[in-house]
Amino acid sequence: MTLDVCTYENRPNELVALKLLVLSLARQEPEARVHVPTAGMPQASLDWLSGQANVALHPEIELDGKGWDVKPSILIGLLEGGLEQVVWMDADIIAARPLGDLFSGMGPETLGVADEAWRPRRVGTRIRAQAHGLPGLTELGFTANTCIVRATRSHLRLLEDWLALLKGDAYRAAQAGHWAERPFHLLGDQDLLNAVLGARPGAERQVRRVRSGRDIAHCFLDMDYTFGERVRAAASGGLRLYHAHRSNPWLRKAAGVAPDFSRATSPYRIAAKRYAAELEPEERTWLENDGPFAGLAQRLSFGRPDLAGLAPAARGSFRRALSRAKSNWVRACQARAPRPDAAIAEQKQI
């Protein structure tokens, strides 16, 4: 079955990311089709996209929302338009290997989603469903990251429920404020999909994870792609997908200024170098100056995305282990602490 991917990015300074996704899919999955709505697209983006053999433009799809929030309306439009299954990918993803059975092995009832990189607090679906006033019926045991969403026609109702929450007053009011001030369950579009999944009975049997550190690397914090995950990935030929995940390295392109070691050895940045020749000169300046130590690390790792940044990954892995230990200690203390109602009952007995 043909792999149908959809994406969208209409910010002019983010066009380079969209190009890298399209170019990498053309190389790694030559038969895949990349579906892109044209609504709100700058002419420069449309001109480039129309020249790519693997891109299908969709002027008929109407976007509901902006930014992150367009995902369900695009998926719904493509599925109602005749596609049997479609995979949303954020534009800041690069395919580094053939995707194989990552999606083709999913059945018609299976929703595919990436999982979020590890975080110590507020993980999962039930807590988000309950925060929205929905029944917390299902706990997936991880937080879904909507950088990847694979859906079929059997998921249209779920996508519509997701879209309805995105159009709600509470979410839109939260989005008007600064990111750091938003409630955890209203941070972004993915928190609302987690709420919808948490309110669905049996969702855990119908969701397949695209696993962080095994299938996809989130290249944001050093702890997001750990030392051990990188070594295992390198031993198996590398991960399939690399996600810039809010780091936006292409925006850091001051001429002659090398990024710091961690950014210079980001797996996403190293994977992007494979397509530098297909970018415009002004679009690849962020790929050109590594700095002496990062350049040496890339040469020693033979340009493999998973290995050049082992040093910052080791530091991040240590911080993650400390954070996990602290989180476990706090939970253990909370479990041992007497409940207020139990303490009151004990006082009454005395």
Image (spheres, grey):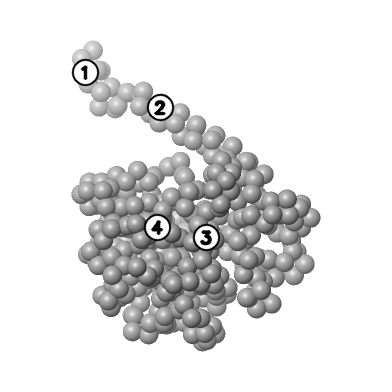
Name the quadrant containing residue 342. top left
**Label 1 element class:** helix
The type of residue carrying mark 4 is: Asp
Q: Is residue 327 above or below residue 244?
A: above
Badge 4 is on which residue?
Answer: 101
For residue 144, side relative to residue 10 (left or right): left
* Residue at the (51%, 72%) spot, across then down: 26
Q: Position of residue 154 (x, y in %)?
A: 23, 64
* Residue at the (33%, 84%) spot, across then down: 60
Q: Position of residue 238 (x, y in %)?
A: 55, 52
Mark 1 or 3: in front is: 3
Mark 2 or 3: in front is: 3
Badge 3 is on which residue?
Answer: 97
In this view of the protein, can residue 188 be seen by the observer?
no
The type of residue carrying mark 1 is: Lys
Q: CA distance from mark 1 to mark 3?
A: 66 Å
Mark 4 or 1: in front is: 4
The type of residue carrying mark 3 is: Arg
Q: Residue 332 got which mark?
A: 2
Q: Quadrant of the C terminus?
A: top left
* Residue at the (42%, 77%) spot, across then down: 36
Q: CA distance from mark 4 to mark 2?
A: 40 Å
Name the quadrant containing residue 38. bottom left
Q: CA distance from mark 4 to mark 1?
A: 62 Å
The type of residue carrying mark 2 is: Ala
Badge 1 is on which residue?
Answer: 348
**As rendered, which of 277 and 325 lies closer to the eye?**
277
